[in-house]
Amino acid sequence: MTAIVDCPVCARKTEFSPANRWRPFCSERCKMIDLGQWASGSYVIPGDPPDPEQPSDAPAPPPRDRN
Ligand SMILES: [Zn+2]
């Protein structure tokens, strides 16, 4: 009996078994995508911590949330 799960990235049906080394992902690609989301800040903690390099009397930096 092999458990079948949905890949968290692409939602493809994926074997959750020792034979699938990328479980719970369907492939290395999806695993990397998921890790990349963490690294690139898709999961952001609300509120930027103060930048210790920034002097307190410096003008505010331009907004970064628009391109
Ligand atoms: Zn996938």
Image (cartoon, rainbow, N blue to C red):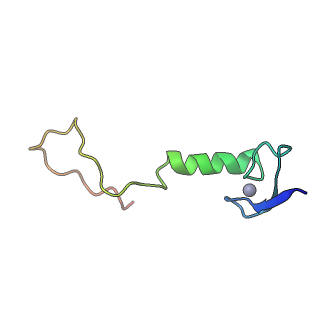
Residue 45 as seen in the image, left or right of residue 57: right
Residue furthest out toward the left: 57
The number of numbered badges drawn on the structure is 0
Quadrant for residue 14, please give it: bottom right
Residue at 73% x, 52% y is 25
Of all residues, the one furthest to the right in this rendering is 1
Residue 16 location in percent, x, y?
80, 53
- Residue placed most toward the observer, 56 or 24: 24
Which residue appears at 18% of the width and 51% of the height?
60
Ligand 1 in which quarter: bottom right
Q: Quadrant of residue 44?
A: bottom left
Q: Where is residue 11 shown, x and y percent of the image?
A: 73, 64
Residue at the extreme front of the image, as rendered: 1
In the rendered image, the residue lying farthest to the top is 53
Q: Residue at x 82, y 46 (%)?
A: 20
- Residue 61 percent coordinates (x, y): 22, 50
Instruction: Specify the quadrant of the image occupied by residue 18.
Output: top right
Along the line of sight, which residue is nearer the eye, 27 or 1? 1
Horizontal side, residue 63 vs residue 54: left or right: right
Q: Which quadrant of the rendered structure holds the N terminus? A: bottom right
The residue depicted at 38 percent of the width and 54 percent of the height is 45
Specify whether 42 is left or right of 29.
left
Is the C terminus in the top left, top right, bottom left or bottom right quadrant?
bottom left
Q: Is residue 9 left or right of residue 55?
A: right
